[in-house]
Image (cartoon, rainbow, N blue to C red):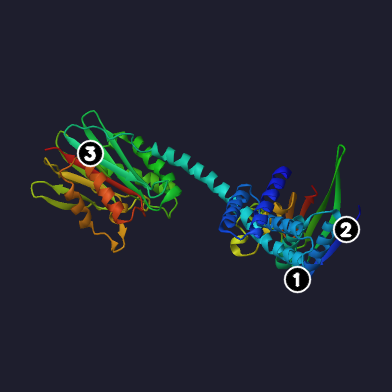
Amino acid sequence: MAESKELLHDQYANILRAYLEEQSEQGLYYAQQFSKRVLEEQISPEEVVSLHLEVLEEFFPDLPKGAHESFELLLEVMMGYGLAYREHQSLRDKTKELEAEINVAANMQQTFLPDEIPHINGLDVGVLSVPASKMSGDYYHFVKDDHDCVGLAIADIIGKGIPAALCMSMIKYTMDSYPEQRLQPGALLENVNRVVEQNIASNMFITMMYGSYDSRSHQFNYAGAGHEPGFYYKAAEDTFEELHAKGIVLGIKRNTNYKEYQLTVDPGDFVVLLSDGVTECRTDDGFIEREAITRLIRTYQHLPAQEIVNHVFYELERAQGFQLRDDFTLIILRRNV
Amino acid sequence: MSIQSSVEVQTEWGIVSARQAGRNLAKEIGFGGVDQARITTAISELARNIYLYAEKGEIVIEAVEETRGTQKKKGIKITAKDRGPGIKNIREVMEDGYTTSGGLGAGLPGVRRLMDDFDVDSVMEEGTTITAIKWLR
């Protein structure tokens, strides 16, 4: 430490001597480099002031009266900066620590989501879920049984970040606990609602939509709990309809019934499920319209489902200047022609 | 060494007197300019805390010595005592950003950084005693 201080002292003396001899831009450049050096060595401002005075008094042993004293005053003024500088260093270290912890949590959260999309005969599935920050408040889930029936869920925990992420595990475990209801969306939501209502704070809510598709009968049954409506594309008419489901948000009322809806899926038809991060995408001109999303889907409709969702996401991300304000999840489930 | 001075802090004048006493002793012990400024800043912060939150208290400044083997080291010890309301959550006030964000200055974390040894003892409704030592290197 003392050695490096001597080194800094000599360096500064050289820089100052050169600059006093000739006021060149190069001399100032060396001073700038020196400032990087002292920052690296974590030397605080008051020490730099003191170093300057030390060197100055070596050069000019007979400083005019008051010069030395004026530096004492400056030193005192710089104390506050010195303290702020050290606080900044310690806060920066703390931020790094927190970030590392959040990364671990975010990785763990990823394990709640399905590793891969199940392959189902006659179905083309595309999914994309992108968190606005490291932790996501959006959840989706796929299960496939031996008869090529598939259950899919999309949920949005109101609020973002860590509290939302903590809730996610609860939904996952609840759904895992009721395997026999995979094909009964209404009953499944009733169970999830009961667990959520009993276990989360009254100021937290979860919206969810659950659907099951039976690839033998091509029936799509679904139920919703206050979730952002999806879309249903009817190939025969080439139109998009709202995929509405009446039902109260999870976690509000203990005994709630969720109405089940049924659709027959014809070849080329597809179901679109989304989170409000998709529809509440905000550009400089305000929120985008729901039609803007169906228009986008239409543009890429000829592509495989996964590519549609990728493209829609890219376009919406671009429209927002590549800054997501909310977690984004988009799922497309299409019956092959 | 038995140099010790005690300064009552009731007004801002008390803060200045405490600083003065600290600077004089620090100089006497042999601290350099930067360390003198650090010690007085620490005294200032502690005295301001008394002035702002406890209304009445005192700052005691003394020279200390410690012998470890053949090594003898000298230092300055500041003790800030008050009979104020006490600190409810010491851990919170020791956190960075707690006081500075409110514009109150360096606060206790600042004092801890300026000095070498630091200790807080606070009892609710009875008062707070803070001790801080800086050793001469």
Hey, what amino acid is under mark 1? Glu
Q: CA distance from mark 3 to mark 1?
A: 73 Å
Q: Which residue is mark 1?
A: B12
The residue at the point 20 percent across, 52 percent down is A296
The chain carrying label 2 is B
The residue at the point 33 percent across, 47 percent down is A155
B17 relative to A157 in the view: left or right: right
Q: Which residue is mark 2?
A: B4
Of residues A74 and B17, the one drawn nearer to the viewer in this rendering: A74
Of discs 3 and 1, which sits in the foreground? 1
In the rendered image, which quarter contains the C terminus of chain A? top left
Q: Classify B118 as above or below A20.
A: above
The residue at the point 37 percent across, 39 percent down is A172
Hey, what amino acid is under mark 2? Gln
| Outermost residue, left side | A236
A82 relative to B44 in the view: left or right: left
**Sequence-wise, which precedes: disc 2 or disc 1?**
2
Q: Using the rendered image of the protein, determine whether residue A66 is visible from the camera's viewpoint.
A: yes
Q: Which residue is mark 3?
A: A125
Dot 2: what SS?
strand
Q: CA distance from mark 2 to mark 3?
A: 81 Å
| Outermost residue, right side | B2
> Mark 2–mark 3 contact, CB under 8 Å?
no
Q: Using the rendered image of the protein, determine whether residue A247 is visible from the camera's viewpoint.
A: no
Location of residue A60 (image quadrant): bottom right
